[in-house]
Image (cartoon, helix red, strand yellow):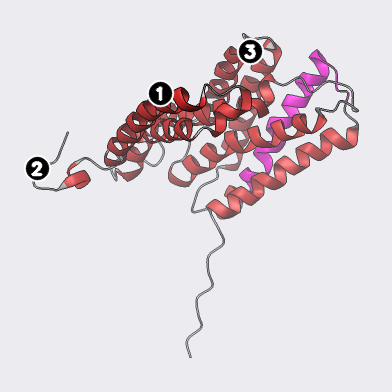
């Protein structure tokens, strides 16, 4: 609902003005996509990720889907520690954006990859990249939400399950055990977040969450791979991949919540 007396996007409630921009961007991308295909043809495989019009469609959808998150973030009446049901609109918004990003990078989606192959498989690096890419896609919304709210139990499970289930659908659930692993990893992440209690006011715990949530996530993941597919990777490779995921998570947490700048001592 537009607010009278305010010009342009300022007339929309907090968080919704950008959604209007998203609708326009999506409409331009949709119209441009028809023209692009008529001139250059239809993209195949990974080329579809880099089409300029598809990037416009992606950007427009991201702006639209993230609207409930932005609106709640800007609302001072939003409780700092909401219950799961109360938090669901925000959580659905964050989950859908994560799914959108995961879909854009589906060629490096860990929960639909077969990584139990021989260690000399030429696609070995794709397996490592899929874990590290998916790690950032799952962890980024969790850390972002943690900066604003005390997350209810089930937040990580919802995001992980959303990505795992919907990405599994892309492959017609060829690897159902990996979808189950996504849900179990989400539960492990939720339990760890409940134990740590990270928040913007407790930076050390926030940074610890950035480092340890990947440890819980990918330990469950590789355990599921070992049980269902068998790990063809060496111990150095799969443990090193988990370690890199933890280091990336720690780095991301430091970027999202850097240490405070020391105050200049008085002269």
Residue bearing mark 3: 171
Apparent side of residue 41 relative to residue 86 in the rendered image (left or right): right
Q: How far separated are the C-alphas under marks 1 and 3?
A: 27 Å
Q: How far separated are the C-alphas under marks 3 and 2?
A: 48 Å
> Residue, x 45% and y 28% (percent of image)?
36
Residue bearing mark 2: 4
Callout 2 crowding tier (Cα within 10 Å): few <14, some 14–19, many ≥20: few
Q: Position of residue 94 (x, y in %)?
A: 45, 32
Q: Which one is in front in this view, the residue at disc 2 or the one at disc 1?
A: 1
Residue bearing mark 1: 34
Is any atom of residue 102 visible in this view? no
Apparent side of residue 182 relative to residue 220 in the rendered image (left or right): left
Q: Residue 66, located in which quarter of the rendered image?
A: top left
> Residue, x 77% and y 26% (percent of image)?
222
Callout 1 crowding tier (Cα within 10 Å): few <14, some 14–19, many ≥20: few
In magenta, the rendered stretch is: 207-232
Q: How far separated are the C-alphas under marks 2 and 1?
A: 37 Å
In this rendering, the answer to whether 108 lies above or below 178 is below
Magenta span contains residue 201: no
Is any atom of residue 96 visible in this view? yes
Q: Position of residue 89 (x, y in %)?
A: 37, 27
Q: Residue 130, located in which quarter of the rendered image?
A: top right
In this rendering, the answer to whether 177 lies above or below 259 is above
In this rendering, the answer to whether 86 lies above or below 74 is above
């Amino acid at each position: 609902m537009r607010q009278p007396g305010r010009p342009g996007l300022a007339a929309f409630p907090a968080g919704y003005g950008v959604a209007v921009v998203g609708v326009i961007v999506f409409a331009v991308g949709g119209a441009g996509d028809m023209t692009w295909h008529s001139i250059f043809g239809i993209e195949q495989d990974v080329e579809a990720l880099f089409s300029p019009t598809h990037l416009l469609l992606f950007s427009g959808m991201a702006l639209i889907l993230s609207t409930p998150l932005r609106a709640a973030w800007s609302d001072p009446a939003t409780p700092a520690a909401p219950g799961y049901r109360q938090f669901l609109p925000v959580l659905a918004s964050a989950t859908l954006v994560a799914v959108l990003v995961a879909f854009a990078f589906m060629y490096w989606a860990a929960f639909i990859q077969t990584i139990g192959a021989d260690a000399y498989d030429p696609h070995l690096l794709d397996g490592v990249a899929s874990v590290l890419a998916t790690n950032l896609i799952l962890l980024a919304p969790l850390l972002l939400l943690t900066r604003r709210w005390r997350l209810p139990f089930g937040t990580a499970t919802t995001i992980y399950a959303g990505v795992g289930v919907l990405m599994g659908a892309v492959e017609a659930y060829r690897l159902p055990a990996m979808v189950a692993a996504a849900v179990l990893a989400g539960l492990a992440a939720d339990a760890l977040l409940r134990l740590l209690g990270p928040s913007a006011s407790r930076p050390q715990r926030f940074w610890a969450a950035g480092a340890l949530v990947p440890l819980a996530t990918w330990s469950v993941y590789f355990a599921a791979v070992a049980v269902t597919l068998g790990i063809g990777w060496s111990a150095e490779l799969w443990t090193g991949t988990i370690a890199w995921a933890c280091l990336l998570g720690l780095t991301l947490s430091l970027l999202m919540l850097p240490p405070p700048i020391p105050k200049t001592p008085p002269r």
